[in-house]
Each structure stands twice: as structure tokens, then as C-alpha cells.
Amino acid sequence: MEVGRGSFGSKIGVVLATAGSAVGLGNVWRFPYTAGENGGAAFILIYIGCIMLLGIPGMVSEFIVGRHAQANAAKAYDVLSNGRPWKFVGYLGILTSTIILGFYAVVAGWCLQYLFASIAGQINGDAEYVKNYFVSFSSDPLKPTLWGVAFILITHFVIVRGVRHGIEKASKLLMPILFILLLILVVASCMLPGALGGIRFLLHPDFSKLSSSVMLEALGQAFFSLSLGTACLCTYASYFTKDTNLLRSASQIAVIDTLIAVLSGLMIFPAAFSVGVNPDSGPSLIFITLPNVFQQAFSAIPALGYVVSIMFYALLVFAALTSTISMHEIGTAFFTEEFELPRKKSAWVQTIVAGIICVFCSLSVGAYSDLQLMGFSLMDFCDRLTANFLLPLGAMLACLFVGWYIPKQVVRDEFTNEGALRGRLFGVFLFAVRIVCPICITLIFLHQLGIV
Ligand code: TRP
């Protein structure tokens, strides 16, 4: 274990760890069907607009706070706010990421179970069988819950190894494997007969589908996908070194994240269209539709279907793991520094809290469907509460804090690494965080409330 705060050891480590946080189930699973349903390339264009206009400035804002303070999220806001109550933005981030970790681990746990099931050849069978398999697995009171908790425990054991030996090492190993698996699956999928229909579905721009709710969808997806709005990036930035170029890193991560999202669409849709399956949304896409698709698409060579299925679930597990690591680290860093607990103990605190949320979320979509809040299952409630409300709020507060509250000189120094970089885009950045982001996010809130 490391002594002291720890930091990432190399530039590539910074980019891979932060990209590892960004690339997750949001890219490999949620992005493809959201894009497919909402106008294909037209949605992707709006999405890229959101990333550039709001995502990158938001990321840089969180980076600035974290790297300047070199502390956990709550302390980072505190250090920069002269006793003013901005610390609550850090608390909010810690709370949000713990809730996300809880429900995200449920789906990640399903992926892990499916990885083992595909290795054991258990999800081979006709369409009815695969569907029943998912229904009986997910409604079992015990199994999915245990897999979810197991996933948090795996995350835990990476976290206790520290920043450099845990987070950075895991990201350096998993991210390249993830990319290679993805490329192999994209090529396999696009070579299937009839794959063109799927490519068209994803990339054909249908501007008639664009509406204000689609814009909202794109924005929510952009925030979630970049891990923005929970002080996650702020915590990671506290491990950056003084010579990390913040704008360049944010841009690189945004490019990697978007590329992987689009490639994931090119993995899923061509295969689905090739066998004439309608790509559904929601959990059934990856747990019911795709196992069928793999079997049918590679029915001539069943061994290939077997391998492809294992690769696919391994890809999901790796993507999810580098993301849950980042959600876990926010709380762990907080408990370690604020309560002066050893890292091991504070990791347990975070694991237990997230584990409890995970158990209840898992039960709410399985055996105990009356675990509801405001008409939603607890799992959906947590998802909506965070994606539609807490993430945009967290991102907006980060932008307002950096744009208006902390001294401009501090912002400039961080942006330009104390003048070592020219910082030609500093004016544009400041305009984005002061004006563009707050206005856009306020509009979103007003829209959600039905006011505009
Ligand atoms: N970005 C990840 C994904 O696309 C999820 C994620 C990781 C996240 N850390 C986060 C989302 C912090 C919000 C906040 O799956």
C-alpha cells in the first residue's frame, strides 16, 4: 500500500484511468440504443455538441478544483471557498456517486454472472430458453444480489491497493484489452451478411426525430458517460501531477469515450440486424437479445458464437469495473482524509454503504418488486434521480464555482500549469463555464419541470 496521498505515475496512466472511469456500461450498452432510438447520426451530432460545449468545460472545471486542492471532493471545495459552504458540492458528489455505485453494481453483477454462464455454456439454447434464463435469474431473491455485491467486492480489492498499484494498474491492463475485444467484435459483427442495415440504423441521420426531449436525453447521456457531476473527476484530478495538461487530457478522454460509444453501436446493431432481431432497449438488449443474436449469427460455427459471447461479457465486465473503481474511490478518499481512517478501513465503509444500496436496488427489480419510490422501482428511481437531477446539478455547481467564485488567477494558473502552457483557449473556457453551461443546465431543469 502507498503511504500519503498517492498519485498517478505517468501521463498515459492519467488518461487511461480517467478514460476507464468514463468508459463503462453507459458507452457499451446505453449509448447504442439511445442513439438508435433517437435519430441515429442526428442524435450523435447533438451528443458530440453536448460533449464539446458542456462536457469538456465541465470536466476541466472539476479537474481544476481537484488538482489545485490535492484533496478529496469535500475538502477540495472547502479549500477553495474560504469557509463558505461550497463544501456541500463535494458532499453532494460523494452521495451521488455512492448511489450510482449501488445501482450500477446490480447491472455489472448481471454481466459478471453472464460471463461465467457463457463460459459454462449455460446461455446456449433457443430464444425462449434465453429469455426464461434471464427472467428466472433476475427474479431470484438471492443470486443477482450476490453477484452485485461480488462486483463491489472486486472493486474494493482494487481500491485497497491504492491509486498507483490499484487504480492505475488495473486501468492500464483492462483498457487496452477492452479496446482490442471491442475491435474484434466490431469486425465480426460488421462482416455478417445483412450487417449494413444495422450500420444504417446507427448512422443514418434522422433529423425528424430530434426534439427537446431528445436533446435532454443527449445531454444526460453525455454527463453520465463522461462521469461528470459527482466530483469523480475532481477526485481523480487530485492524483494528477502539476504538469498534466488539463484541457488536453479532458479532450483526449472525451474522444476515447465517444469513439468507444460509437464502436459499441457498430458491434451491436449490425449483428442484430443480420439475424433480423429488433434491437430493444433496456436490460433485455444485452441479456436476452444479444445472446440470441450471437448464437444465430454464428450458427454455422458454434464455437465462434461461444467465444464471441465470452468476449462480449468480458468486455462489459472490464468496462464496468474501471467505472465502479472510480465511483468507489470518491467515497474512499473522503473517509480516509476526513476521518483519518486507514485506506483499508475507509474502503470498507464505502463498500458496505454501496453494498446495502445495491442489495435493495437488486431486490427492487427482482424478487421484491414492491420496493418502490414515487411509482418507480428503487433501481429506476436511483437511476432517474442521479441522471436527470443530481448529475446536472453537480456539473452546474462545479462550473459556477470555477467560473464565478474562485479567483480567476487560480483558474488561469491551473489551466495553463502556472504559465507553462499558452492557454489560448482560456477565454473560451471561461465563457463556457460562466455563461453557456449554467444557462443550458438551467434550461434543462426548467424543461423537466415543464416550465419551458
Ligand atoms: N461514465 C461511466 C459510464 O459511462 C459511469 C460512471 C463512472 C459515472 N463514474 C461515474 C457516472 C461518476 C457518473 C458519475 O458507464
Image (cartoon, rainbow, N blue to C red):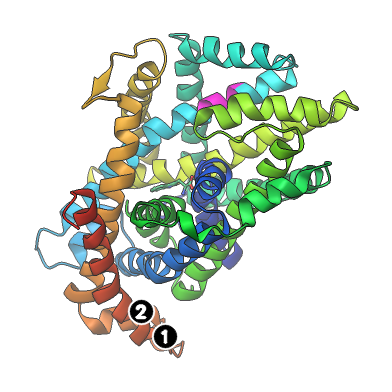
Q: Position of residue 13 (x, y in %)?
A: 57, 60
Mark 2 surroundings: few (<14), some (14-19) or many (≥20) residues within 10 A: many
Asked if residue 199 lies left or right of residue 413, the reply is right
For badge 1, the amino acid type reads Leu
Q: In the image shown, does 285 or 277 lie closer to the viewer?
A: 277
> Residue 410 at what x, y percent from top left?
27, 79
Identify the residue at image location x=50%, y=12%.
143
- Residue corresponding to mark 1: 425
Q: Which mark is residue 429?
A: 2
Seen in the picture, residue 177 relative to 228 is either above or below; the reply is: above
Q: Secondary structure at mark 2?
A: helix
Mark 1 close to ligand 1, CB under 8 Å? no
Marks 2 and 1: in contact by CB < 8 Å? Answer: yes
Q: What amino acid does circle 2 point to?
A: Phe
The residue depicted at 35 percent of the width and 28 percent of the height is 379
Drawn side of residue 327 relative to residue 301, left or right = left
Q: Quadrant of residue 127?
A: top right
Q: Nearer the viewer, residue 277 or 321?
A: 277
User: Range of the magenta residues?
Assistant: 109-113
Mark 1: give few (<14), some (14-19) or many (20+) Cα within 10 Å: few
**Which residue is most to the front?**
208
371 left or right of 123 in image: left
Residue 230 % position (x, y)? 32, 51
Q: Is residue 299 magenta?
A: no
